[in-house]
Image (spheres, helix red, strand yellow):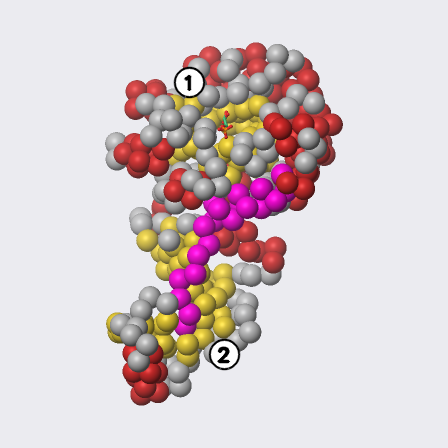
Amino acid sequence: MTCIEKIETAGLIAVLDTADAAEAVQAVKALSDGGISCLEIMFRSAEIDRTAQAISEVRKAFPDLTVGAGTVINKTLAEKAVKAGAQFIVSPGFNEETIDYCMVHAVQIFPGVSAPSEIERALSKNLALLKFFPAEALGGPAMLKALGGPFPQIKFLPSGGLTAENVGSYSALDNVAAVSGSWMVQKQLVADKNWAEITRLSHEAVLAVLGFTFAHLGINYSDPAACAQGVSELGLFGFKSRETEASWFCGESFELMKNSILGKNGHIGIMTYSIERALAYLEPYGYHPVWDTAKWTGEPQKSMLQFIYLDKALNGFSVHLKRR
Ligand code: 3PG
């Protein structure tokens, strides 16, 4: 996978503010224990060589993680970051000199934009993935949605003011490649060496980005007549029925299947903001996609998964994912 593919698959970049290599390694261990695989270490201290050292130590200690440098506000910092082994460079603003340096050295750069004119300048440099900063102050998801109109080819990394509570409204957007922020690894938690809390917040962040919610419970019937009987029984509880080709929905929470398909007893439908990210998250737990059940939307080149079954059942109930 390329660096951009890794970032898009994770959907989340943790932003760490420390210039202390030992502290950085411990904080990154805590992030990684919580399921975070992409992060940036910011040049926020005047001690730029120590920050570069922290990047280099983290790269050495965690070769499987994707590690970038943040707050790269000039070319000098970009040079230090690249030398230290940063796999990508992020800047809060749009600095032509920094961008050109990175492009000449074939280093991934995600410059910050805050308005359409900067996006047009990015387009003229063939950049298609941009940091959107400071996201909350700029109008948040509503602004990103609006920017999707004139700039459908651009994807964003919103950062600035994101939290476990508001992050889902960003990661739900088609033009958000990944969200980023420091809320799970705040400076005080690092200073307090509260690694357990960083791990807890990281796991919470990963789940908030995926946005899993219950969609419905599918119940298998042996034939359409038995299913119709089930529909009238659930009707006693006031659930309104709606027929589809293969099933009857009773309210939105129950789907009664006209015939027994997939799953001994039925299925559990689970919603997520991104099926692609959810599949990557579930893979290490032994869940794999059943590709011939996949449904897609969009042009072939940018189609997104809308629906897919997983290959592992829960007590006789198969599981499918559905895009929120
Ligand atoms: C950044 O540079 O990306 C931000 O400082 C991160 O923003 P946050 O601290 O509000 O998450």
Q: Is residue 89 above or below residue 196?
A: above
The percent coordinates of residue 114 (x first, y second) are 36, 23
The answer to which of marks 1 and 2 sits earlier in the sequence is 1
| Label 1 packing within 10 angstroms: few (<14), some (14-19), many (20+) | many
Q: State the CA–CA distance, disc 1 to disc 2.
A: 56 Å
Helix, strand or loop at mark 1: loop
Q: Is residue 12 above or below residue 300?
A: above
Image point (50%, 61%), residue name: 289
Depth check: give the residue in front, 154 or 20: 20
* Mark linked to residue 264: 2
Q: Amino acid at mark 1?
A: Phe
Q: Is residue 36 above or below residue 86?
A: below
Image point (36%, 33%), residue name: 140
Image-based side of 2 in relation to 225, left or right: right
Helix, strand or loop at mark 2: loop
Q: Amino acid at mark 2?
A: Lys
Depth check: give the residue in front, 187 or 226: 187
Image point (48%, 37%), residue name: 163
Q: Is residue 43 above or below residue 39?
A: above
Q: Is residue 211 magenta?
A: yes
Q: Is residue 209 magenta?
A: yes
Image-based side of 306 in relation to 277, left or right: left
Quarter where residue 117 is shown: top left
Task: Identify the magenta region.
Answer: 198-218
Image-based side of 215 in relation to 42, left or right: left
Whether residue 292 is visible to the viewer of this picture, yes or no, is no
Quarter where residue 159 is shown: top left
Residue where numbered disc 1 is placed: 94
* Mark linked to residue 141: none
| Label 2 packing within 10 angstroms: few (<14), some (14-19), many (20+) | some
Q: Are marks 1 and 2 in contact (CB under 8 Å)?
A: no
